[in-house]
Image (cartoon, grey):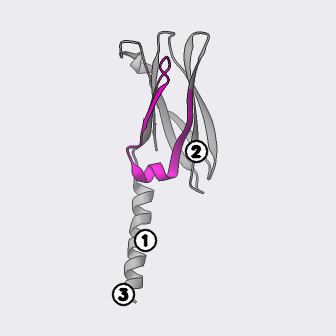
Amino acid sequence: MMKSLRNLSLATGLLILTSCTSGIVGQASYVGSQHEMSSETQNFIIGMRIAMDDIKTTRENDFLVANMVLRNKWPFSQDVQYRASWFDENGVEIEPERAVWNKLILTGKSERTVKLTAPTTTAVKVTITVRD
């Protein structure tokens, strides 16, 4: 009986921790001309619920364009926010005031493709940040 109560308590604690945890899902950077990609998950629990997949960049009319799929791995709806920070060839952020958080509601077990376009044609790198 005590073991069952301890297991129930542990499971309840994990459920509370999971439902109250917030933070950065991850960041992905892409240097368009060198085809280098790096990504980082900063919160393991949120990373279990939300995935950043199929991140690709292209050029459209000389603007760097990033496409990614945000995937909800849970059966419940989740509110997420994302933003892109764009950088020039010297590593200087381009128009940081335009890097605003965009809200997206992902229904259970769904995915959405997000398209982000650089504010100028001088962008060669993008960092995409997703949080809940």
> What is the span of residues highlighted in magenta in the rendered image?
31-56
Q: Position of residue 107 (x, y in %)?
A: 62, 49
Q: Secondary structure at mark 1?
A: helix
Amino acid beneath label 1: Ala
Residue designated by label 1: 11
Which amino acid, by three-letter code, is at mark 3? Met
Mark closer to the chain start, 3 or 1 = 3
In the image, 39 versus 16, the foreground residue is 39
Q: Which mark is residue 121?
A: none
Does label 1 or label 2 sit earlier along the sequence? Answer: 1
Horizontal side, residue 63 vs residue 34: left or right = right
Report whether 116 appears left or right of 91.
Answer: right
Q: How many marks?
A: 3
Q: Position of residue 103 (x, y in %)?
A: 53, 37
Image point 47% across, 20% down: which residue? 34
Q: Which residue is mark 3?
A: 2
